[in-house]
Image (tube, grey):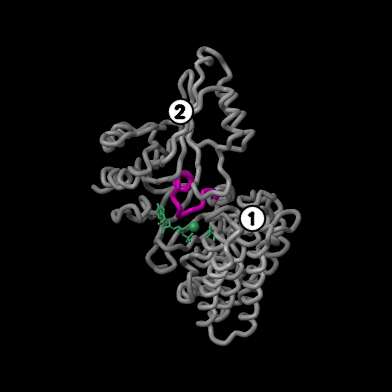
Amino acid sequence: MTGLIVAKFGGTSVADFDAMSRCASIVASNQDIKVVVVSASSGVTNYLVRLAKGNMPTNERDAILAHIADIEFSILKKMGNKPELAQALEHLLNELSAIAKESELANSLALQDELLSFGERMSSLLFAEILREHRVHAVNFDVRQVVKTDSSYGKATPDIEQIKHQAETLILPELPHSVFVMQGFIGSDEFGKTTTLGRGGSDYSAALLAESVQASALQIWTDVNGIYTTDPRLTAKARPIPEISFDEAAEMATFGAKILHPATLIPAMRSNIRVFVGSSRDPEAGGTWVAWETEHKPAYRAIALRKEQVLLTLKSPAMLHATGFLAEVFTLLAKHKISVDLITTSEISVALTLDEPTNGNSRKITPTLLAELREIGEVEIEEGLSLVAVIGNHLQATRGVGGNVLSALEKYNLRMICHGASAHNLCFLVRSDDAPGIVEHLHHCLFDN
Ligand code: ADP
Ligand code: ASP
Ligand code: MG
């Protein structure tokens, strides 16, 4: 392990010239930051996602392209006269516009990923120049040469060995001389085609890159000063957590805390890289350190909320006293590449939750899957649900935990409860309409005293 640091700046941190300049000051003031990973400027990926659907009326498409150009050029404008940079930006925007007009776009996931990559490519181009203005010897590096993935466009799986090899060949030898500015979120497959790691994936990119250059720390700079006891948008009482263990933070990310992409901590844990989360608006305010050991291990650390859940219940009276029911169900789900989050079972039924984002490109519960499930038993599907997770330590072995949570929520219908499988979480499924109120009330009961 080296002393070097990888710093990642999220969308709001690189939203405009002033925000980028604040991030540049963070990099310029710490010589150990040798690798910088940037997201697309805030809002740009959302625009690109709309464009990527294809088949859009010309005026709507042109309006979106104009909004994107506006975000990028207003950053450039504040940088003074930079003809070469303007040309490079113009080139990227023209390329983007050509892809947005491709007739194949709606049917080609590969083309959609290519289109989605432009947000990060434009922000790294601009950010590298702003760093140079802060007297940092910065190079804008195309991360697709290093972040090699499979060809699952839209949510590609990184190839850890290849990433390590590419980083050792292309990045490490140059690090003594330069700061590498790279794009989060994107990679490339064996055919050289652009891939993406899924929404919010820049955190994951940064962690993969930190692992591949053997960094000692990964800094995630965002719009809040650390990981909070719950999403500060859900309650004004949420407060930053100074230190949290990998296990707890990983549970938070898995259970929907948007502050970290769910896979971010996997490389950090595997390679023992400390992770810091802080606000690029207020770098002096401190933030959260994520590490193996924490000084305090409170029973309750945080509450996470994961929206857009579906509960699938499968019932088969024929399975009474029979064996192999669950094996059959899970074999089928695995065949359809469905990962299940929570399950509860009884002798003749099993209920499980799935992530089913309403704006997702691909529905998980397809007609084929349903037909195959119906061959096993009666299927019921409930939508409009959210998962609330209480995260902490020794929850399964601490007296009163279940009682505290349940009595706090006596007014609500808890559709399903999972407790005991992990020492770090207690989760329950509730109606999405109730979820924000539940988080706020539970936060009050568990943390505000
Ligand atoms: P970035 O663009 O920097 O990646 P994100 O919007 O993806 O930023 O993540 C930061 C946001 O995550 C915060 O503004 C906050 O609303 C949300 N969030 C959700 N859960 C938490 C939590 N437990 N602590 C802090 N922020 C959280
Ligand atoms: N720009 C991408 C997104 O908005 C990746 C990221 O910001 O992490 O999802
Ligand atoms: Mg994010």
Residue at position x 25%, y 48% from top?
448
Looking at the picture, tell me which residue is in the foreground, 132 or 236. Answer: 236
Q: Is residue 239 left or right of residue 210?
A: left
Q: Residue 332, can we see it?
A: yes
Tell me the number on the disc at residue 106: 1
Looking at the picture, tell me which residue is in the foreground, 143 or 387. Answer: 387
Q: Nearer the viewer, mark 1 or mark 2?
A: 1
Looking at the picture, tell me which residue is in the foreground, 15 or 264. Answer: 15
Name the element at disc 1. Answer: helix
Residues drawn in magenta:
248-263
Quadrant assignment, res 226: bottom left
Residue behind label 2 places its C-beta within 8 angstroms of ligand 1: no
Q: Are marks 1 and 2 in contact (CB under 8 Å)?
A: no
* Amino acid type shown at disc 2: Thr
Using a 10 Å C-alpha cutoff, classify the residue at mark 1 as few (fewer than 14 neighbours), some (14 to 19) or many (20 or more).
some
Q: Position of residue 365 (x, y in %)?
A: 55, 37
